[in-house]
Amino acid sequence: MSAAEEVAEEVAEIIAEEVEAVEEEVEMSVLDALKEVLKKALIHDGLKKGLHECAKALDRRSARLCCLAKDCENEEYKKLIRALCAEGEVSVIMVDA
C-alpha cells in the first residue's frame, strides 16, 4: 500500500467516526437539546432568570426564547410573560420544573 492510499484510508476512517458522532447527537431528545442550549447561554452570559430580568429582556426585544415552568401557580406572572412574548413575537416553551 502506498503512502497516499494509507492517508486516504485514515481520512476515510476519521470521516466515518465524525459521521457516527453526528448521528449520535441527532438522537438527542428535545428536552436534552433545550438543556444544552440553556447551558451554553448561561456560559456565554446570555441567560436571563427571574421575572425582573426576563421582563427587561422581553421589553428590549433582545430575547429569542422564553421558558416558563408548567407548575407556575401565579396567573399574573404567566399572563405578563405570555403578553410580553406575544408583543415581541418570542416563542414560549412550557417546561417541567
Image (spheres, rainbow, N blue to C red):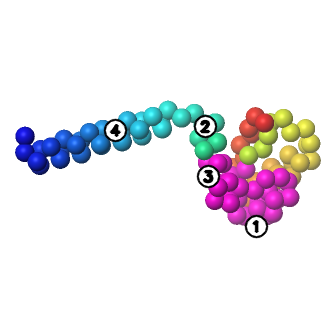
Q: Earlier in the sequence, mark 3 or mark 2?
A: 2
Q: Secondary structure at mark 3?
A: helix
**Within-10-Å neighbours for mark 2: few <14, some 14–19, many 20+:** few
Q: How much space separates mark 4 and mark 2, taking CA atoms?
A: 22 Å
Q: Secondary structure at mark 4?
A: helix
**How many angstroms separate mark 1 from mark 3 (CA)?**
21 Å
- Stretch of the chain drawn in magenta: 37-66
Q: Whole-percent x and y of residue 88?
A: 73, 59
Where disc 1 sits, the SS reads loop
Give the residue pinned by disc 2. 32
Amino acid identity at mark 1: Arg
Image position, residue 86 (x, y; %): 76, 54
Which residue bears the numbered disc 1? Answer: 60
Contact flag, marks 2 and 1 (Cβ < 8 Å): no
Q: For the point 85% across and 54% down, which residue is it? A: 51
Q: CA distance from mark 3 to mark 4?
A: 25 Å
- The answer to which of 2 and 29 lies nearer the viewer is 2
Indicate whether 48 appears above or below 67.
below
Question: Which residue is the site of mark 4?
Answer: 17
